[in-house]
Amino acid sequence: MMTVIIISSLIFIAIGILLALFILFAKNKIMLKGSCVVRINDNSPLEAPRGENLLEFLSSNGHSVPSACGGGGSCATCKVRVVTEEAEVLEIDKAHFSIRELSQGWRLSCQHRIRENIDIKLDTTNNAQVFQGKVVSNNNVATFIKELIIEVAEVDGHAFIPGDYFQFQIPGFKTNTEDWKATMESKYYSDWEKYGMFGKEIEFDLDEEIIRAYSCGTHPKDRYLKFIIRIATPPLLKNGKLDHRIPWGMGSSFLFSLKENDLVDMSGAFGESHMIYDEREVVFLIGGAGMSFGYSHISDLLLNKKSKRKISFWYGARSLKENFYESEFKFLQKNYSNFSYQLVLSEPAKEDIQSEGWDKDDPVQTNFLYKAFKIGYLDKLEAKHEEPDEKLYYVCGPPAHNSSVMQLLKEYGVDRELIILDDFGS
């Protein structure tokens, strides 16, 4: 008897779950049909397909809302005010806004879909228009990193400040990695061949353009906009080959495919990771493609502003082949006594050690950057009874680099407000 009751209960619960799922599915289908009216800053109403992403809709209608994380919901820069009564509140909104801000209608536009007629209020002071740029060059400067140089009509007109980023409009596209050899020196081929990365066709069929943000490596007097782009590849399997079940990065693949004279739609500049101007020493802790952020700040401080404050630059790369802009930084170190440059290699190649004389046993030269920085900088401060919290720290690089450096600084008592972290979550 008990067995019958249990089985009956389970059947009843299963039927209830199926009915609930069916109702949700049907509701979703109904909700996504038709269109909605969107009014932006009390201007003429616009028609939007029901269910369209709010950030993408705003962008496609000439309102380029900043989105440093490219719509991932982590940076909270794409905030807008939805002034419609009873506007939907998502859990991610609650994580980024106070109760008062939520009641005022603040929402993350990248996370919301248009499901009803809404009124939107945008901050026009932070709403750059989309403009077009032309590719000047797009060459590899490291195995998996390109230097993309863009010409625009008026760089100054886009109010660029070191530490800013620009947004690229990524359309549907098709490319083959074999074609990328045209802008890549042969010395970078070996790793691509080792992991079977050439000859891969990449295609993204998009109904709407998507947005991806990249730090700008330009200082304000540069003629061109410069970006350091690292390709986002599928992860490696145990056999050393790419897991092609995981797609290549959409934004980085599109930018890697660009050739001289190609046109790209962009918007910006946006950003908050700007320089704090005082007399404190500035320490840059940079890894990989974070070079954009570091080079922009340092070149502006020294070449444009002729700053006399002490500037320390620590850069982490895998090997000498992966290190770039070295001649520029050595020039700065030679001509500006207040600037120091320390390169740290995590995996120096045999030729680095045998031909270039790289010291593989020196823990300040051969190490992970955060460990080298601890030994070669922070421990020396302690020995001299100097406090690390009397300086400013600018941090940018891949996620593992950023988290390791942030944890190290925390352990040494450096307040978070003394750290400017440029983190795109990439």
Image (tube, rainbow, N blue to C red):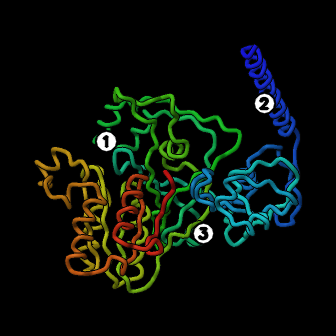
Which numbered disc, 2 or 1, marks the residue that appears first in the sequence?
Answer: 2
Residue at point 75%, 64% (across, down): 102
Tell me the SS state at disc 1.
helix
Residue of label 2: 21
User: x%, y% of residue 47?
Assistant: 86, 50
> Taking 53 as reference, is 408 above or below it?
below
- The type of residue carrying mark 3 is His
Which mark, residue 188?
A: 1
Residue contact at pointers 3 and 2, CB within 8 angstroms: no
Query: Which residue does the image show at 52% across and 60% down from the upper left?
Result: 151
In percent of width and height, residue 280 lies at 37, 83
Q: What quarter of the picture does the N terminus occupy?
A: top right
Question: Number of marks in the image?
Answer: 3
**Mark 1 or mark 3: which comes first in sequence?**
3
Image coords of residue 379 (percent x, y): 23, 70
Residue 221, compared with residue 192, is above or below; it is below
Residue 158: numbered disc: 3
